[in-house]
Image (cartoon, rainbow, N blue to C red):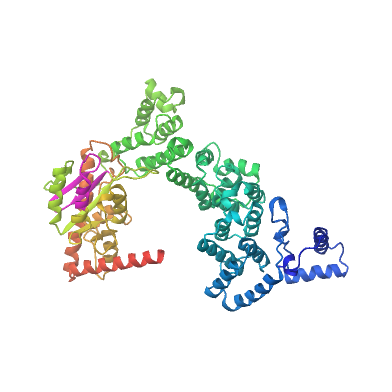
Amino acid sequence: LVTMSEATNVPHPPDYEDYYDDELELFDSYSNPDSDEDTFESSVYKTRQNLKITIVPDKTHTAGLHGKPFDASLTPEVQLWYDNFKSIWGQYKKGPVVAKSLELFYSSCDNPFLTSLKLFADCPNLSNIKPNSMPYAILEELQQYKKKHNLNVANYVDDNLKMVSFNLVKGQGQINLFRVAKEIFNLVESKGIFVEEVRTMTKQLQYKEACQIATELEMFEEFDLYEMVLPLLLQDKITVVEEYLNGAVHLRRPLLELLDSFLDRKMSVTNNCERVIAKYNYPDVRYNKLDTKPLTKLIQRLAKMYNMPTELTPNMNKRHNYGALQFLIHKRFIEKSLNKDSWEEMVKVTVPKDAPDLQLELVNACSDFNDTTDGAMWAKHFGVPHDDLPIDVRDFFEGKPRSYAHVEDWDDQGQGVSYHRLSKKTKITVVTTRTEFREMIDHLHGQSVVGFDAEWKPTFHANTDVALIQLATRTRVYLIDVICLRVQSEDWVRLGRHVFNNDEVLKLGFSPANDVNILQKSLPSLNLLPVASVAAGYLDLQELRRRVMHLPRFRFPYEKHTGKVPTGENLSSLVYLCLGQQLDKSNQFSNWEKRPLRQDQINYAALDAYCLLEIFDVLEGVLTHMGYDFGDFINNLLTESRGKRTNSGRKTQ
């Protein structure tokens, strides 16, 4: 890379600008030879192409205010020092020797700010400045010199010199270098003179650096949504935008509303975005990000970060509710794993009263799956217009004779499925008072093994808060009603210390890490240790299952049972393999925040924790019969699992 200033160190002659223009015209003629003749010009052009030489115009030519040139020439004395300094740099590079040399030099200058910029401009490779390069060191040491001697910038620097510093450091892709110049020359105080410079950068499609500079100079009122923020989001440069929005508060709301408009279901996300992309001719758009899922995640992230109300994102809310409804329909009519009570609870919290399209979607789905009675019930509940109803539901209301279908509750279908049930001898205590809470802790503190689970309302897209905590011993199951319970922070601390963080109490869970994470977010006073912590004392029965399956001659008690075996590695299949019956999971997707809890919800929640103890006891019996020391087997498993999680965490970090 060759600059004009590298070719000479003498002051520009009076006719410099005309000479410079002539030189550029000559270079243009080399770059565009008119013929293939073997002329001198074409020879120079070919040589440049072969050597990959790029002619870079001298930045100092238009570095000042209003495009005025900056005289970067050095006096003979400074030139002599600079030549010696380059020798020092070549020997020592960036370090104490170079720093001391620059400090002594700055102390001898009448205006170290002006001289440092001249040295900076005279450095080679100004188009590719690295943190350990000479020009970077020149400014960094001036920054330290300014702080050490508490220099008053106003005595040395005017707006023209500030503009020179701005133009010399911009375009480097080194925002840290710009921060150094900003601090040295107090650029924020004169940010108004740089607004058009930054706007020019956006017009030249340099969105990222323009936005970073605007953030550094606190230009939060000077630019609209479409100049930097939106094109950067479309290029998936989210971090840069978020840093700018931390100051540009007035842009947060319109940005969220604009992004939400892209989710309008009348058209695809890509088509909605294309209108804006074409209007402003945005380049380098990441079209793979113009999809419902990544855009929804972005809107959620921004809304949470800036505490925006959900009313600002109606299209996202509609898409969320539509997806949630499709999920419930699948669970109810295809998987047949959602009982009638859970189905009705979840539909009521999923389908808003002001969403007629979603209400009609629900009624049509019931009709499509031949549940006319349910479709009519929802049509009446939401007041769906009669003319919009499917024919079978319309006939139902008109009383026309017809055999109307109704999907019976799965428990009553008589399919011969035998579900595992909680023993009547096991006492269930729903903990709703402080007295019950303290009695529970006293009982659990003396146990060696406890089954642990937690329940929360499926929200599909919002933050999740625990509604119920299940802790089971071999004689009792405690259901901590987090919604109704009123205890002090110190009570939760005590539960965490005596049970959850007590390694003398082995907590049995099925993939418990997620439960523990949500529990800690919902109840931070518990101060829970991570599941992988040595002091936590959690045993993942899913991991235990995988381990015992690889033992020679190991067989689950009901592995060859002729009944219907649940597929997958879920808890229901493990219960079947150990106890001969599967779990009834039809209450899993319930509204766990609704009070009072239904009795079948209480039974389901209690059994979900208690069955972990039953599985543990069965596996202990099988392994003991095979000649294993079960205590040693579990201790080895816990030690190895913690080691794997710790190593995995280190790699991630």
Query: Residue 203: x, y in percent?
Result: 66, 48
Magenta stretch containing residue 493, yes or no?
yes
204 or 263, which is in the foreground? 204
Q: Quadrant of the C terminus?
A: bottom left
Q: Can you give x and y, in whole percent of width and height, for residue 127 in the image?
A: 66, 64
Whole-percent x, y for residue 372 in the image: 37, 30
Tell me if 570 is positioned left or right of 356 in this view. Answer: left
Most foreground residue, 609 or 192: 192
What range is drawn magenta here?
467-495
- Camera sees residue 594: yes
Q: Is residue 59 left or right of residue 366?
A: right
Q: Is residue 453 found left or right of 146 in the rendered image?
A: left
Q: Position of residue 646 (x, y in %)?
A: 33, 66
Q: Is residue 360 above or below residue 440?
A: above
- Quadrant, the N terminus: bottom right
Could you tell me if residue 579 is visible in this image?
Answer: no
- Looking at the image, residue 546 sits to the left or right of residue 242; the answer is left
